[in-house]
Amino acid sequence: MIATARDPRVEYVMRLGDNALVLAQRLCAWIAHAPVMEEDVALANVSLDLFGQARLWLGYAGELEGAGRDEDHFAFHRAASGFRNVLLVERPNGDFAATTVRGYFFDLWSYLALGELARSRDERIAAIAGKTRKETAYHLRRSEDWLIRLGDGTPESHARTQHAVNDLWRYTGEPFLRDEIDAAMLDAGVGFDPATLLDPWNERVRSAFSAATLAIPSDPWMQRGGKSGLHTEQLSYLLAEMQALPRSMPEAAW
Amino acid sequence: MKTLPALATVRDWLDEIEDPEIPALSITDLGIVRDVRYVDDVLEVALTPTYAGCPATQVIRDDVERTLRARGVDRLRITERLAPAWTSEWLSVRGRERLHEYGIAPPHAAAEAGLALGPIASAIVRCPRCASGETREQSRFGSTPCKALYRCDACGEPFEYFKPH
Ligand SMILES: [Zn+2]
């Protein structure tokens, strides 16, 4: 008999934590590889913020679950199928344009989502969201600045950015899909309806793309699966690297 | 039964603890000590992180623990308080002066986390070395989460600006 009675908040908070954790791990791979030193520092800072956010969310998920798992356990001792991040954040870094576009799509969604969660009936969720939304505004401003500079830059930067947009667009639908977990959280006053964020998200993207002279892809087909644990193979490679040490030496400590 | 130290004394002890990343500031200058109180005979200290991922948070917690234990506080609980979220408005007046002397431009008033583009500060950020207002933001992200990189066009020196947050 499979236990299904666990609090849907565990799953809900895990999704928030996994989005931050997977993107943080992606971004720290840029350290010492960014095109200029200021960007090296910026990407490291954003990554660090996201690791902090992941720690807050996953720590709370562990408390809600009550099975003795802490944030480290969630990060290092789950297989890919146990992760609940959206597919967007596990896309490979690609070039600087691809990292910028992926960051922009996520930062904008995250900023809007945290604004909703800051009004959650769950005080802990509201506190974490209120805190992390402030730093997410910094991330968004940076990724949007770069999106516009690259899109409205040289023919080379424009072409690379448009290519990244065309490649990543199909991953922008999943964060706005409402499933049974979202519905339960909405009913409980803990969460929000993700579909309601689509209009403000699209509106902001349209105006940024217009300034960046970028075209929005017309293909409406969208990928999905990450929120329920169905991931691309790219996540497995990321986890293999991130989890290697604690899995081979479970007793290792600082 | 021994007497418990007065809360004002405890606050003085906490004020001697340096921020590990900007040692010119004490942790009380930084505004991260949110509450000090006794619950029965247990001293409770509530700390708030500046940024969610700030690595100084754990160091500060350890420093508070070590400092208070060394002063003989043996019934101690340190808690993390997330709401209301830390803001640079909580920097003390003395802290702002110390930042300036240390070579870091103190923060302007923190606006509500907005989405406007452009530099983070619309107000003039003065160079802490030569006081010129002819400065430019180089990067919104600096050597620690709380600082941005600036450059002074008058004296040519780079400097750090404590971000309004
Ligand atoms: Zn100067």
Image: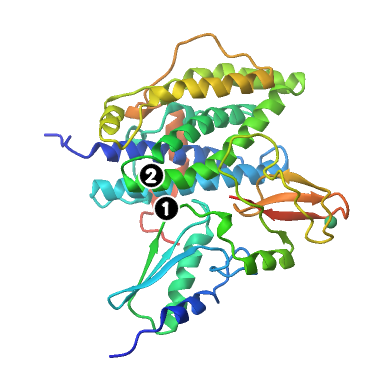
Q: Residue at x 72, y 64 (%)?
A: B100
When the figure is inspected, residue B153 is found, relative to residue A79, above or below; the finding is: below
Dot 1 amino acid type: Ala
Cβ–Cβ under 8 Å for marks 1 and 2: yes
Report in which chain the residue with disc 1 lies. Answer: B
When the figure is inspected, residue A168 is found, relative to residue B2, above or below; the finding is: above
* Picture quadrant of ligand 1: bottom right
Q: Residues within 10 Å of mark 2 (few under 14, many from 20)?
A: many
Residue bearing mark 1 = B83
Query: Residue A167: x, y in percent?
Result: 55, 18
For mark 2, give the secondary structure: helix
In the rendered structure, the answer to whether residue A240 lies left or right of residue B43 reads right
Task: Evaluate whether residue A32 shows in this view.
Answer: no
In the rendered structure, the answer to whether residue A72 lies left or right of residue A95 reads left
Q: Residue at x 46, y 79 (%)?
A: B8
Q: Residue at x 71, y 28 (%)?
A: A149
Dot 2 amino acid type: Ala
Per the rendering, the mark at residue A229 is none
Residue bearing mark 2 = A126
Query: Residue A241: x, y in percent?
Result: 47, 41
Query: In the orientation shown, which residue stands out farthest toward the right?
Result: B154
Please name whichever residue, A148 or A32, is drawn nearer the observer in this view of the structure: A148
Q: Residue at x 72, y 23 (%)?
A: A157
Q: CA distance from mark 1 to mark 2?
A: 8 Å
